[in-house]
Amino acid sequence: MTYDLVLKNGQLITAHESFVADVGVNGERIAAVGQALAGAREIDARGLYVLPGAIDGHVHLTDPRYAPLYTPSADSFAVGSRAAAFGGVTSLVDFAAPQAGVNLVEELERRQEEADGQVVIDYTST
């Protein structure tokens, strides 16, 4: 089988062990871990660590509506998610902070609309 992308001969790091292997990717998902995998695109990862993507479960991305109450974060959805991706984070959870009297579901929908089209990794808000 040929994968969309194969990371060749990387030092894979899991929660339980470390070993040299290839990682085959189709679309956005890991499809195989093994030896001598073939890919339409191949990257030589020999001597490099291959880590699973991290989840940042608590971020506060900028929301200027709350500046009088809180010091706003410097990271927009676009900048914060790109910085996360460069650090190996594949998913983040932004914390919405609705003001008194604001419906939580409406606030979460508003934050999702602000994030849509800007974030480059998986995203949710709580």
Image: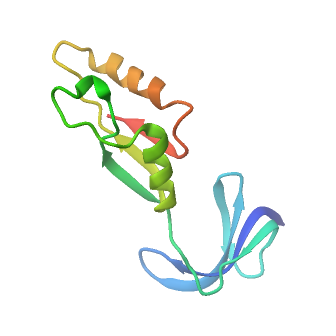
Q: Position of residue 2 (x, y in %)?
A: 84, 65
Q: Is residue 35 above or below residue 92?
A: below
Q: Is residue 118 above or below residue 81?
A: above
| Residue drawn 20% across the image and 20% down it | 99
Q: Position of residue 5 (x, y in %)?
A: 74, 64
| Residue drawn 51% across the image and 59% down it | 86
Q: Nearer the viewer, residue 38 or 45?
A: 45
Q: Is residue 17 above or below residue 102?
A: below
Q: Nearer the viewer, residue 95 or 17?
A: 95
Locate the C terminus by quadrant.
Answer: top left
Tally of numbered discs: 0
Could you say which quadrant of the image residue 20 lies in? bottom right
Locate the N terminus by quadrant.
Answer: bottom right
> In the image, 63: left or right of 23?
left
Q: Is residue 4 above or below residue 122?
A: below
> In the image, 22: left or right of 105?
right
Q: Position of residue 47 (x, y in %)?
A: 60, 87
Q: Nearer the viewer, residue 50 or 67?
A: 67
Coloring basis for residues: rainbow
Q: Nearer the viewer, residue 15 or 56?
A: 56
| Residue drawn 77% across the image and 81% down it | 36
| Residue drawn 71% across the image and 52% down it | 27
